[in-house]
Image: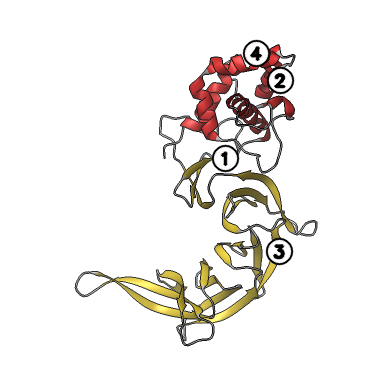
Amino acid sequence: METEGKIYRYIVVGTSYINVTASSLLKGRVLVLSVILGPSGGVEVRRRYQIQCDAPVYSLAPYSSSSLVYCSGHSINMRTLNAQTKKFDVVAEKKLRSPAVQITVAEPWIHLSCGEDSMLVLKFEDDKFNELFSDEVARNGFHHFQLLQGFFLATDKELGVVGLWQPPDRRNVESLVTIIEAELTSSISRIRQGNLRPPWYMKGTPPGTKASGKDLIASGIDGSMFHLTLLEEDSLHLLRYIQDLYRTKAGIGRHSPQDTENGVRDPRMGHVDGDILVAVLKLGNEWLREMLMKLDETGGSALAGFTELVGRVQGIFQDESDPVNAVMKYMNELVHGVVL
């Protein structure tokens, strides 16, 4: 925080506690702490400021150089540190439909993950919160991560992950637009982005993916870790087709690849399981080639259709002219390039 031209570094904590003397037992506090070197040479934590709240504090985030945004109960609040009184002045407050479990700020935008909205977008202007966008579907929001300008990955507590787009102009639409939707094996509590590939690995963005040269890593509430890759549509169709081939062969799929159109069905299944791609890689190139030939023998044109799918992914052929070899090499780059 910055006051009177000086910068102070604080640790801010939102808490809840039981007040046995009050009619409403659960209360909350926002504690502003500082870490100093004590007289004995040890590190000491001291409380500098305290904001009393009528309900538990679920989330908070800094805003500008001297303000805090926090959610207490069903309310979003903003307080600003007054340099003269050394207290936090009330700036704005707004009721929410449900508590916000995460707050991120990109001034003047404030993004919330709420219990009834996987994402809620507010704009702070004229000393008040204005609600601009919310998710078009009521989801039990858990976490959100801004991947690109106006594009967010949001998770819920029912295993879901969605890609939400914030339109630049709300005159035409007031809801965040769902672009992608998937269901994982664990609810995602955090998503982070970083370069997790070894230095000798290929640089740049792999063909058929939407990324900025960095990788997405997600942590599940059960301790599991996920490497996420945002696929372009043509790449999704190709990899879903291969995944469905494996699931059909293994007897774990409800649909045959021939029963789908380009491998895309339910939006909740609009993703590819990397573990299945690893299993296909272990089976080898000839397994995939044999599966395609068997489908051709039943009167289909699987190999020709497969070659067409491969050709739609720009840059996948490169030095390989054989579609099966090119795809296996491509899948290997996607799933084996990251070090966790």
Q: Nearer the viewer, mark 2 or mark 1?
A: 2
Hey, which quadrant is residue 288 in on the image?
Answer: top right
- Nearest to N terminus: mark 4 or mark 1: 1
Asked if residue 283 can be seen in this view, the reply is yes
Question: What scheme was used to colour the molecule?
Answer: secondary structure
Q: In the figure, residue 11 lies in which quadrant?
A: bottom left
Tag 3 and tag 1, C-beta contact below 8 Å: no
Residue nearer the viewer, 249 or 60: 249
Mark 2 highlights which residue? 305
Question: Mark 1: few, some, or many residues within 10 Å (few <14, many ≥20)?
Answer: some
Relative to 155, is 132 on the left or the right? right
Q: Which residue is mark 4?
A: 293
What is the distance, in whole Å, between disc 3 and disc 1 at their CAs?
27 Å
Question: In the image, what residue type sits under mark 4?
Answer: Met
> Mark 3 or 2 closer to N-term?
3
Q: Is residue 170 above or below residue 249?
A: below
- Report the front residue among 53 and 50: 53
Q: Residues within 10 Å of mark 3 (few under 14, many from 20)?
A: some
Q: Position of residue 141 (x, y in %)?
A: 60, 58
CA distance separating discs 2 and 4: 12 Å
From the viewer's perspective, is the residue at label 3 or at label 2 nearer?
2
The local secondary structure at tag 2 comes to helix
Q: Quadrant of the C terminus?
A: top left
